[in-house]
Image (cartoon, helix red, strand yellow):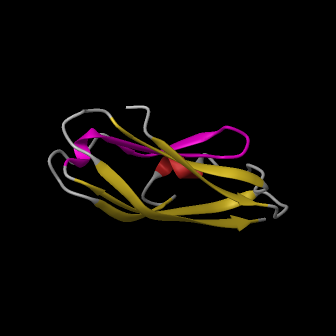
C-alpha cells in the first residue's frame, strides 16, 4: 500500500495556470488504486481515489475541467520536482505504471 513515487522535474519559472496529467497504469482491479499528483511545494491533487470497482487499467488524461482537484494547483510555482504517487490498497493483485506525462501551463 506504500505504492510508488515517480518524479518529473523542471527548472521553468512562473506559476501554474493549467495542469494535465496522462497516466497509463496496468492493474486488474482499479478500485484498489489511489493516484495523486504532488507539486514541488507539497500541494496534492487526487486524480483517482479507489473508484472503478473491478475495472481494469487506467489509461486517461486528467484535466482541471474533469478533475477539480487539479484546479487547486493553480498559482503553484512550476519549478521543481513534480511527483506522481500510485498506491494499491489491497494485496490481491499487482499492477504497473507503464508511463505518465505532465503538461504544465504557466502564467
Residue depicted at x 37% and y 65%: 60
Say above or below: 102 vs 55. below
Say above or below: 10 vs 81. below
Residue 49, position as x, y percentages in the image: 35, 40
* Image quarter of the N terminus: top left
Say above or below: 76 vs 97. above
Is 47 magenta? The answer is yes
Horizontal side, residue 97 vs residue 15: left or right: left
Task: Single out the residue that lies furthest toward the left.
Answer: 54
Residue 5, position as x, y percentages in the image: 53, 45
Residue 80, position as x, y percentages in the image: 76, 52
Residue depicted at x 45% and y 65%: 99
Is 45 magenta? The answer is yes
**Total number of numbered discs in the rendering:** 0
Which residue is nearer to you in this view: 80 or 94? 94
Which residue is nearer to you in this view: 73 or 97? 97
**What span is in magenta?**
29-49
Horizontal side, residue 69 vs residue 38: left or right: left
* Image quarter of the C terminus: bottom right
Residue depicted at x 26% and y 43%: 51
Horizontal side, residue 86 vs residue 26: left or right: right
Which residue is nearer to you in this view: 14 or 32? 32
Residue 81, position as x, y percentages in the image: 71, 51
Task: Single out the residue that lies furthest toward the right.
Answer: 13
Horizontal side, residue 56 vs residue 33: left or right: left
Where residue 92 sits, quadrant-wise, is top left
Amino acid at each position: 500500500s506504500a505504492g510508488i513515487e515517480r518524479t518529473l522535474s523542471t527548472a521553468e519559472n512562473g506559476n501554474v495556470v493549467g495542469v494535465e496529467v496522462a497516466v497509463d497504469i496496468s492493474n486488474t482491479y482499479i478500485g484498489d488504486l489511489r493516484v495523486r499528483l504532488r507539486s514541488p511545494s507539497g500541494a496534492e491533487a487526487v486524480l483517482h481515489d479507489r473508484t472503478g470497482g473491478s475495472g481494469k487499467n487506467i489509461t486517461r488524461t486528467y484535466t482541471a475541467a474533469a478533475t477539480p482537484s487539479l484546479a487547486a494547483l493553480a498559482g503553484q510555482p512550476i519549478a521543481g520536482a513534480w511527483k506522481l504517487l500510485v498506491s494499491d490498497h489491497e494485496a490481491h493483485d499487482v499492477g504497473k505504471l507503464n508511463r505518465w506525462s505532465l503538461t504544465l501551463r504557466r502564467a
